[in-house]
Image: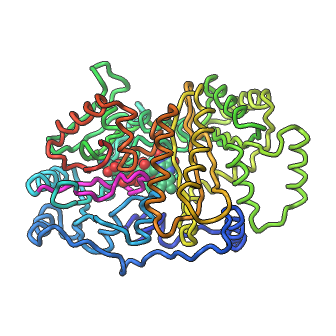
Amino acid sequence: VCVDYSREKLKWNGWGWLEQDFDLHGREEGLWEFLQAQLGIDDLPDTPAVPLEEMPLPENRLSESQIEDLRGLLSADRVHVDRYERLFHAFGKSYHDLIRLRRGEIDEVPDAVVYPQSADELVALTQFATTHHLALVPYGGGSSVVGGVEALAGRLAGVITVDLSRMNRVLSLDEESLTATAEAGIYGPQLEEHLQKHGYTLGHYPQSFQFSTLGGWIAARGAGQQSNRYGAATKFFAGATVVTPSGILHSLATPNSAAGPDLRHLIAGSEGVFGFITEATVRLRPLPTARDYRGFLFSEFKTGADVVREIIQEHVDVAMLRLSDAGETWFLSQFKSIGKPASWASKATSAALDLVGVGENPCLMLVGLEGTTTSTSASRVAIARIAMGAGGIPIGAKPGKGWYGTRFDMPYLRDALLDRGVGVDTLETATNWSNLHHLHQTVRKQIATSIRRHTHVGTGEPIVMAHISHSYPDGASLYFTFIFPVALEKPVAQWKAIKREVSDSILENGGTISHHHGVGTDHRDWMEGEKGELGVAMLKAVRDSVDPHGLMNPGKLLP
Ligand SMILES: Cc1cc2nc3c(=O)[nH]c(=O)nc-3n(C[C@H](O)[C@H](O)[C@H](O)COP(=O)(O)OP(=O)(O)OC[C@H]3O[C@@H](n4cnc5c(N)ncnc54)[C@H](O)[C@@H]3O)c2cc1C
């Protein structure tokens, strides 16, 4: 395990490694010109982030003797109360988090950050928090985009953020059952390095893979980019140990169980509200020996969506099917060509596409196949039959390879845009196939309308795009991205207003409030709309049974 996740190596108010930025290869000017033209802004402002030393730091609510006691429970070097650690752990990595951090608009930060190394230490921490009425915030990679790790005390006397990244060992590998058990704070690359040495993979590669942990994946019910093959967290998660303020829960890692409702479904998606997942057992696959990523174009999103549905309903072995709508396909091609003169080859390509009827607003479908040479060849044939039968145009492996090679890079761009007053946010949902087209159209329109309504900067149009990212026999998820001018005088209010209207629209139109990002603080107010009053009461009853004093991650998941 060689990746070093020391907190000082990571950005405290942005994405990823401190030393890494989005590399535009000298095409910055082209990007700013493109955005200025689209958003209708003459000159993008400089909007640098408040430096660490100038950030307001709320007073520490813990007494010296409480901090000393914490040091006694763990060890002095694993209890931090300094500025960097407290600010680093104040928020996750959502747009909402970053704008507040960058502007120094923070009300609460953890009073202490602790790094436990065992379940016994977590038990001791829950006892300490019970005695002193303190909130405990489980923190894995901190990549939550829904306010899942925000340091909220609620009615309690202070907040201890519990950073689990030192609980990062692989504990066992069962090669017969194809499962592995690991401590929950293990990061994606650390886990995969260990598994791949033995010829296996979990295959869970969210875009945040490099900066998120096993416990966070399960706690937020996440889905990796290749979830069609490897499954979302609910599918690969086989069992866990959870330390709660009321005791330790072990869920049996059997393949299935008819012993009443499955407790694993309460652990997955529990977002730290029921306790700390200390270790988890996950289902593995042999490491693929063949990989094939390629593209198709369709004249319409609906045709492409029908193709995705048919491929999934035929149970073709596919790792990823990602269908961009016309807006996203347009944006990707514009972004790629920023600062480059239109080549004769690209002109010839668009002329050829016109000729074969794909038209001016094509939709790109990226297909990712993983497995053996035999299985990927069989899938390639089946997909070509379905896609080309519906009028899709195969465009070869280049777009697939390009996407694969840069699949973790895009989040770095958000920081660069925020430096110039340009916001970029994402949201996601899922629905049944019969409602997918309607939901796509309605939410897309709502995002644009809400941005226009709450943004009085720029004379252009916001950039709104979407893709199908994960699909199932009965439906699929939709992932929306939008780029807009930040309302610099009140960016948080702007974001909240847009978020509220779009979230209402998602629920009113038959979508879930989240397919894979979770609930946190940002979606909490829509939980009753989705689960009903009784459903939320059931979840609260579970919470009260494992955490009667409400110490665990207050303000998240449950309204
Ligand atoms: C750029 C970017 C891209 C992303 N792409 C994806 C994607 O493709 N797919 C996807 O699913 N998500 C994605 N996310 C969201 C996020 O990465 C996931 O929710 C991820 O699963 C969180 O893992 P983490 O370790 O960072 O958890 P954290 O952010 O630390 O925590 C998430 C939630 O789980 C709780 N928690 C964490 N660890 C534990 C534990 N051991 N026990 C109990 N509770 C715990 C926290 O309290 C919090 O409520 C993305 C986020 C970003 C910023």
| 422 sits to left or right of 235 | right
Q: Residue at x 70, y 54 (%)?
A: 331
Q: Is residue 252 visible?
A: yes
Q: Residue at x 16, y 49 (%)?
A: 123
Please name the colour scheme applied to the rendered image.
rainbow
State the residue in front, 404 or 275.
275
Q: Which residues are magenta?
A: 133-153
On the image, the x and y values in percent for residue 21 come to 56, 69
On the image, the x and y values in percent for residue 115 come to 26, 61
Q: Quadrant of residue 112?
A: bottom left
Identify the residue at the far bottom of this view. 53
Quadrant occupied by the C terminus:
top left
The answer to whether residue 552 is above or below residue 357 is below
Instruction: Find out whether residue 137 is within the magenta segment.
Output: yes
On the image, the x and y values in percent for residue 82 come to 26, 74
Quadrant occupied by the N terminus:
bottom left
Q: Quadrant of residue 299?
A: top right
On the image, the x and y values in percent for residue 6 come to 37, 67
State the residue in front, 296 or 518.
518
Q: Residue at x 30, y 38 (%)?
A: 240
